[in-house]
Image: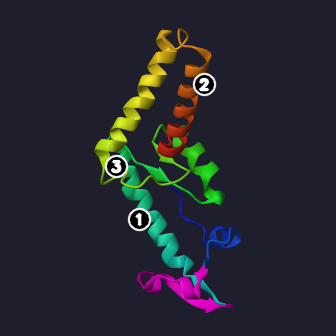
């Protein structure tokens, strides 16, 4: 990855943190100062962490493993979805389902249900259903897609 440009981070407002009253003490080493009730993030430390993260993600991707991208903020949703699709990696851009990592058995069932619906559409058994059943299954598929991402 190319070197992270501090000026570019500044231009994109990366330095704006959360309100000072909503801060997490674990972020203290990365906070540069406070201005008008908002923490200002140290962009030099941010750039170093971006490069460190980029190297780690490259190693994981090059080893053939999957990376789950998560972005539920409005500003990042579309970009993350587009980039994750481009590299064929899973992503979540709506809500984070509770138990996504800790209750994987339940999540796996939902993923299998989504795959079953997709197979039904491909093999033609979906066409044999009534209009109402098709509508219900399509709604169920859309809900699963929204909750589980891609």
Report the residue marked by disc 2: 135
* Residue 117 location (% of width, % of height): 47, 24
Whether residues under marks 2 and 3 lie with C-beta atoms below 8 angstroms apart, the answer is no
* Residue 10 location (% of width, % of height): 66, 73
Structural crowding at the residue carrying mark 2, measured as other residues with C-alpha within 10 Å and reported as few (<14), some (14–19) or many (≥20): few
- Left or right: where 9 falls relative to 32: right
Q: How many marks?
A: 3
> Eyeballing the image, is 25 above or below 143?
below
Report the residue marked by disc 1: 52
* Residue 9 location (% of width, % of height): 63, 69
Report the residue marked by disc 3: 60
Question: Magenta residues, as a range?
Answer: 18-36
Whether residues under marks 1 and 3 lie with C-beta atoms below 8 angstroms apart, the answer is no
Whole-number angstrom distance, CA of label 1 to CA of label 2 = 47 Å
Is residue 131 found inside the magenta-colored segment of the image? Answer: no
Q: Decide which of tag 1 and tag 2 comes sooner along the chain.
A: 1
Q: Residue at x 45, y 86 (%)?
A: 28
Q: Residue at x 61, y 77 (%)?
A: 15
Q: Residue at x 45, y 69 (%)?
A: 49
Secondary structure at numbered mark 3: helix
Q: Nearer the viewer, mark 1 or mark 2?
A: 2
* Residue 128 location (% of width, % of height): 53, 8
């Amino acid at each position: 990855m190319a070197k992270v440009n501090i000026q570019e981070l500044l231009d994109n407002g990366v330095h704006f943190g959360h309100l000072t009253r909503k801060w997490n003490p674990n972020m203290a080493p990365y906070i540069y100062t406070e201005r008008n009730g908002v923490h200002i993030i140290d962009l030099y430390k941010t750039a170093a962490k971006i490069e460190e993260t980029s190297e780690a993600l490259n190693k994981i991707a090059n080893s053939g493993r999957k990376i789950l991208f998560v972005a539920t903020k409005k500003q990042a949703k579309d970009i993350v979805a587009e980039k994750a699709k481009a590299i064929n990696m899973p992503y979540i851009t709506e809500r984070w389902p509770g138990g996504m990592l800790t209750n994987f058995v339940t999540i796996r069932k939902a993923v299998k249900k989504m795959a079953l619906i997709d197979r039904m559409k491909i093999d033609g058994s979906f066409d044999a259903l009534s209009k109402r059943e098709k509508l219900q299954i399509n709604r169920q598929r859309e809900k699963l897609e929204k909750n589980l991402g891609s």
